[in-house]
Amino acid sequence: MRKLALLGIVVAAALLAGCSTYKPATSSGPGYSEMQIDSNVYRVSFRGDGATKPDQADEMALLRCAELMAEKGFPFFVIQSGQAFASTHNYTTPIQVKAKDSKATVTGGQSYAINTPSVIKTVVGLIERPAAGIAYNTQQIVSSLGPKYRK
């Protein structure tokens, strides 16, 4: 029973952490970052946490691309290249030993594999929608994905 309670706590903590991954990344934590490559070309990276699903990571990277393009004054953008991958990290719960009436109870020591998805997109900002190909409308992406991930 204690194992189930502990697992519930770990899962709940991971899910709560997942609610706050749409933010600027810290040095090794989840979140987004960007780098300017040319006057209208940027590389946007997003790293999720253990509660982030791959499709959510892709949407959060797309949202950051749109926000960045809006900040830079580009009403449209195209994705020049993109890649998605996941890293697996192992987490082992702490081991605790409690002694009472010459009996020892050991809890913890369970290991869990935690997958963290990452997405990298290189985007090109555009002033006008191109006649051919797929171009994203910056404001449409911000309006549709922003409320879903900015909390």
Image: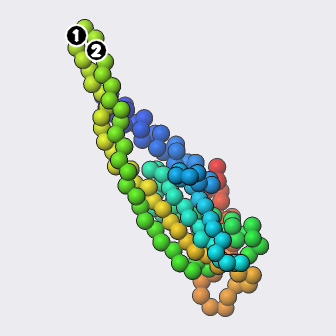
Front position in the image: 62 or 97: 97
Direction from residue 134 to residue 74 in the image, left or right? right
Q: Residues within 10 Å of mark 2 (few under 14, many from 20)?
A: few
Question: In the structure shown, which secondary structural element does the residue marked by tag 1 occupy?
Answer: loop
Q: Is residue 77 something that shows in the picture?
A: no
State the image coordinates of residue 150 (x, y, percent, origin top left): 64, 53
Tell me how the rendering is colored. rainbow
Front position in the image: 136 or 37: 37
Direction from residue 94 to residue 134 in the image, left or right? right
| Residue drawn at x 42%, y 41% as measured from the top left | 11
State the image coordinates of residue 132 (x, y, percent, origin top left): 62, 91
Say whether marks 1 and 2 touch (CB < 8 Å).
yes
Q: Is residue 109 something that shows in the picture?
A: yes
Quadrant occupied by the N terminus: top left
| Residue drawn at x 62%, y 65% as measured from the top left | 34
Q: Which mark is residue 102?
A: 1
Question: In the structure shown, which secondary structural element does the residue marked by tag 2 occupy?
Answer: strand
Q: Residue furthest bottom?
A: 131
| Residue drawn at x 41%, y 61% as measured from the top left | 86
Query: The disc labelled 1 sits on which kind of residue?
Result: Ser
Direction from residue 124 to residue 89 in the image, left or right? left
18 shown above or below 122? above
| Residue drawn at x 34%, y 39% as measured from the top left | 92
Q: Which mark is residue 99?
A: 2
Query: The disc labelled 2 sits on which kind of residue?
Result: Ala
